[in-house]
Image: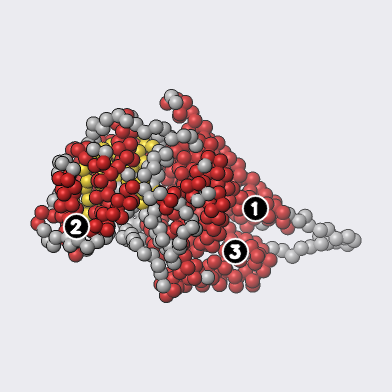
Amino acid sequence: MTGARALSNVLTTRACAILVSVGLGAGAAALFLQFGAADGYQMVDGVRAALVFVTTFWLAWGAMQAIAGLIASCQAPEPLTSPITTRTAILMPVYNEDPGVVFARVAAMDDGIALLGLTDHFDFAILSDTQDDQLGAEEEDWFVHLWDDRAQEARTSKGLRPRFFYRRRHKNTGRKAGNIQDFFERSGANYDFALILDADSLMEGSTIAELVRRMQAEPKLGLLQTLPRVTGAQSRFGRAMQFAAGFYSPVFAQGQAAMQGVAGPFWGHNALIRVRAFAESCALPELSGPAPFGGHILSHDYVEAALLARAGWSVRVDPDLGGSFEEGPENMIDFAKRDRRWCQGNLQHVRVISAPGLKPWSRFVFFQGILSYIAPLFWMMFLASNLYATATAPETDFFPEPFQLFPVFPSDQTSKAVGVAVGVFGLLVFPKVLILVDAALRGRVFQFGGTWIALRGMVLELVMSSINAPIMLMWQTRAVSQVLMGRDGGWPAQTRGDGRLTLREAFSAGWWIQIWGVAVIAVTHLFAAKLMLWVLPISVPLVIAPLVIWATSLPSRPPVFLTPEEFSVPPVIADHHRVMGQWAHAQAPINAPSARLTA
């Protein structure tokens, strides 16, 4: 496909998605305005209609991404076979992680590269921002263990001694983005490309090689993003998210790729970058003023993608690339903690969205990120405005004129409100149904256990997400409120491993949500009893929030939420388990001076 035709397709997809989303939002607002003004127009009716427009537009926009992905779906291209002539640094930033598990991931990925005979083209650099000295010492010890283990592997295969580097910053200026920038300033000139990972990332050697070959083939490609698959989940919450990421995300990512073209996304990890492009374009400024809106940029990945696009480099996501993996939160509390940081980072983009020279689509991406976190506020305002409108609605006057002999019955517009509610539900469910049908027609559904097992997974995921959504809405609303009040959430370390919670922990995290649920039911009963049936699907999950938080953290067993990685364990994951088994009883050297190697 020529560049002009590809650009035309991207612009057409964007225009159609935006126009349809705006049209659906406007139609829903018009219907709800007719319903609200049936007993006489009031100012609150206009407010409610405006809130319906915004929330419906946002839901429709998500649905259009799925539809665009289904339309744009095509067969994956054949892997490239061109020789690799470049050098790539594989960067793994770590921050207060379990060093044994992290270094075993490095060993597993190195095995995959070694099987392809490409070790001469790849170096690994573990970039530590760990602030705990004891944990930092353990990292150094495990690095020596990794070094010795890899040296043994190299001698066994009669290859060269592998190249691994480790350095720890005692002051984590700029956090992850600053960590990577520090590496580029010190060692970036030694490499053509850099593969940026997270501490929980795993990637097949063949995927790493394909990324490099694709970037070699396109000199203007500055960043190539893969779609990581969530693996290793054990809890009900984690497995539901893992299923959704595996079943729905490839289609949504394909739609995103169709809309973004060469001004695509960067999700901060599992992506290959061109070092020169990144070093020349992506030095991040420190924003003026205190956190949360000032200081270092938290959600640096979207900003770096925008800066690359501004400098004329292509930024692309290739959802067809498999073999890219990550882990996810195992309970709702850990998810909310991570989401709090993302919330602050996305709202911080109000300081970046007007930066000079940015592509219009990059500005729209920032707008999407901001809207994704303030949308819960609109839902809360919509609920509050409906309670207010019902409580203050005038009594129906059947005899508006003096000496009127026959009553005048007001027009019943309830069907309009019901239509809007059905439409909103359809925007949530219809894309998932389409994805299931498409997966059945293409045979992809068999990777998830077949049509019926996948259907059961979809229904259970829909039920769970419907129950979880009001609780997550409360956490997001609190997060936005905290940021707007000037509270800095910092950068808490990720929680790995078993996410099982006790009832006490769940109650400690969710008691305030319970209070809000009881308050919503009480206020509705006192002032707007007619809305009780509409409010219960929201308020009941809030009232039982601690039970939901606890129950979803418990282990879940197959065959619920089956994913392809459970039918056929990917080689890099199997090798990671093998290495962990071999290292389980290994004693890492203590305070070995050779551990302090720098990149």
Q: Quadrant of the N terminus?
A: top left
Question: Looking at the image, is mark 3 or mark 1 earlier in the sequence?
Answer: 1
Mark 2 sits on what residue?
Answer: 142
Q: Is residue 73 above or below residue 150?
A: above
Locate residue 382 relative to residue 350 in the image: left or right.
right
Q: What separation in Å lies between label 3 and label 1 (alpha carbons)?
A: 14 Å
Callout 1: SS: helix
Estimate the spatial distance between the alpha carbons at disc 2 and disc 3, rounded to whole Å. 50 Å
Q: Position of residue 395 (x, y in %)?
A: 74, 65
Mark 3 highlights which residue?
A: 537
Rendered location of residue 191, percent (x, y): 21, 38
Query: Is label 1 or label 2 in front?
Result: 2
Location of residue 194 with respect to 518 vertically, above or below? above
- Give the amino acid at mark 3: Pro
Residue occupying image coordinates x 61% and y 50%: 426
Secondary structure found at label 2? helix
